[in-house]
Amino acid sequence: MLSVVVPVRLLLVDDAPEARATLEAHLTRCGFEVVTCASGDDALGILARQKISCMLAEARLFGSGAAELLSRALTRDPNLAVIVLSSRPDVADAVRYLQYGAMDYLPKPLELPGVEAAVQRALRRRTERIHERSAGRLLKEELVNLGAELAGERAKVEGMTVATLEALVCV
C-alpha cells in the first residue's frame, strides 16, 4: 500500500522581511510547508483559501484588535493552532493572547530550535483538541441514541402495565 506524507502547512505572518525569510527557511528545513504574508488582513485571506494547521504571527500586527483577529482566525478554523511572536515581550500581552485562544507566545529574538519545539507542541495540542471534539460529538450521538432507546423501552413497559391492569380488572 502506498503511503503519502503530506507536510503540515504553517502560516507565518510577519512584516519584517528578514525575520520572515529566516524563520521560513528554518521551518521549511524542519519539514513544514510554509506560507508567508506581511499583514493580518493577508493572513485572514490565506486562512479563507487554504487549510492551515498552525499560524505564527507577530504580535504588533494584531495591533489593538488582537481579540478580533484571533477570534476571526479561530472562527474560520476552531482547530487552528496560533503562536504569537513578539518583538516587545510583555507578560500582560502574553496572558491576553493566550486568553484569546493562542496556544503559545514566543518573545523575540527567537531561538530557532525553540520555535520548532513550540510548533510541535501546538500541533500536538491541536490534534488533542480535534480528538476531544470528535469524542464529544460521538458521546452526544450516543446519548441521543440511548435516550431514544430508553423512551422506546418506557413505552413498552407502559403498554405492558396497561395490559396487566386491564387483565386484572377483567378477572
Image: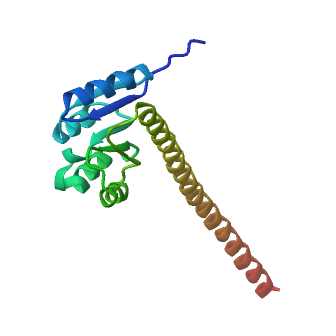
Work out whether residue 167 or residue 65 is closer to the camera in this orientation and state it: 65
Q: Is residue 37 above or below residue 62?
A: above
Q: Residue at x 36, y 50 (%)?
A: 102
- Camera-side residue of 58 and 163: 58
Percent across and percent down for residue 17 are: 20, 28
Picture quarter containing residue 41?
Answer: top left
Q: Is residue 147 left or right of residue 123?
A: right
Q: Residue at x 59, y 64 (%)?
A: 147
Give the image quarter of residue 139.
bottom right
Which quadrant is the C terminus positioned in?
A: bottom right
Front in this rendered view, residue 146 or 161: 146
Going by the image, does 142 lie left or right of 81? right
**Residue positioned most to the front:** 109
Residue 99: where, in percent of width, then height?
A: 36, 59
Q: Position of residue 157 (x, y in %)?
A: 71, 72
Q: Image point 54% across, 57% down: which residue? A: 140
- Residue 107: x and y in percent read 34, 45
Q: Is residue 124 above or below residue 25?
A: below
**Residue at the spot 48% in from the left edge and 36% down from the top edge:** 117
| In the image, farthest residue toward the top | 2
